[in-house]
Amino acid sequence: MKILIVGSGGREHALGWKLKQSPLVSELVSAPGNPGLAELGRCVPISVTDSGELATLAMREQVDLVVIGPESAAAEGLADRLAQVGVACFGPTQAAAELESSKAFMKDFCKRHGVPTAEYKVFDDAIHAKAYLGDREPPYVIKADGLAAGKGVILAETRREADAAIDEILFLRKFGAAGQRIVIEDFLPGEEASFFALCDGESAIALTAAQDHKRAYDGDKGPNTGGMGAYSPAPVFTDLARDQTMEQIILPTLRGMKAEGRPFTGVLFAGLMISADGPKLIEFNVRFGDPECQTLMRRLKSDLASVLMAAARGELASLPELEWSDDPAVTVVYAAQGYPDEPLTGSVIRGLAEAARIEGVEIFHAGTRRDEDGLLRAAGGRVLNITATAPNLADAVARAYASIQLIDWPGGFCRRDIAWRALD
Ligand code: AMP
């Protein structure tokens, strides 16, 4: 198989790393890729949102399968384009991607199909939105409807903060067009977990769960980020929670999407609050989480290429059960100083080869670039993902930090407490 991976983050490098191990894969191409993916195959500089060019590339290269990494590519309709030209695709159509690209759609959908999630209301005007707050209890959860790179959610402790958030989104357009509408929902208490299931439009199979760290600094302090680290498995996510999530959330969603003429293919990522009376859905994402994906790829023993192809072809039901390593995996995100607000790019990174030699460690690239003179430099906010596995989580964490110790990058920082909740 020749496979085209769309994306340029640590998630896509981890998918490529795993795909490359498959005896079924003859060649990998990435668009636009990154220096890590460039070690696995050719990278073609096409933006993830340029569906037309990507479909042309897939045809010209005669790839057997396209794997969509980021939600933006799915939301732009890449899968629809590929279907038109007859190329198999792992990833949802534009209509199916609305589960992530519109929170209002997702919440209304959950209500129609009885999927457990927080009570909510959708608004496009500030006056009614503020009036609604009068009936609710703090903390208030206010969300921009559209895609806002994980930043479109505001948790407000007071009415004053909540009113300000409504004005910022609806009037000041803090999140641009993503904030034409807002969702206000009740706060769900509990511990969060990320659960992933593979879908082929008709059937779904459970992958596994992970937990991530959204805040920038130790102790879960500081601004929200795309994710500063993750680990899998998630101790809070028991077998019972998995069964409940499949029965109450994933399968009704799959059936509902099919019934509404938007069959879902790809990975359905349920952001969950594990509460006393079972898992509740916080959000759907229509792709692997980044950095959760990196930990999943380190634990998956089954052949990824055949699994993704089976999902793309609607053949998941006939797939043998997936095998996972019992060894936990952890990812520590090494970010550029200043991330998430204003990451300083351009600084030189040295020592990766030595750092990757620590037992159990794999280093995935995210926001890096290679200079004309071969130097590796920071080119984004989240720059490297140091992943490690070991027979227990404490050792995996120790290995990841031992590896980071060997990386010579004064321009970077990372959290020092990844997986603390599971280690406590
Ligand atoms: P989202 O982008 O919808 O996943 O929201 C981002 C983060 O905000 C989540 O990971 C939660 O930590 C928090 N959050 C969102 N909605 C709720 C809610 N209804 N109750 C509690 N926390 C929430």
Image (cartoon, helix red, strand yellow):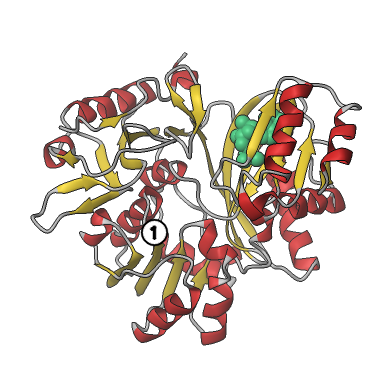
Q: Is residue 370 left or right of residue 297?
A: left
The one of 373 and 393 positioned closer to us in this rendering: 373
Q: Is residue 166 left or right of residue 215?
A: right
Residue 391 x, y percent position in the rendering: 33, 28
- Kindly identify the residue that appears in the image at 37 percent across and 24 percent down: 415
Asked if 147 appears above or below 312 in the picture, the reply is: above
The amino acid on which the numbered mark 1 sits, given as a three-letter code, is Asp
Q: Is residue 353 left or right of residue 142?
A: left
Question: Where is ligand 1, by quadrant?
Answer: top right
- Kindly identify the residue that appears in the image at 50 percent across and 21 percent down: 220
Residue at the extreme left of the image, as rendered: 373
Asked if 155 appears above or below 89 in the picture, the reply is: above
The one of 306 and 42 positioned closer to us in this rendering: 42
Q: Which residue is mark 1?
A: 303
Q: How many labels sit on residues?
A: 1
- Kindly identify the residue that appears in the image at 33 percent across and 53 percent down: 13
Quadrant of res 97: bottom right
**Is the residue marked 1 within 8 Å of ligand 1, measured from its CB?**
no
- Residue 142 seen: no
Residue 282 x, y percent position in the rendering: 69, 38
Residue at the extreme front of the image, as rendered: 172
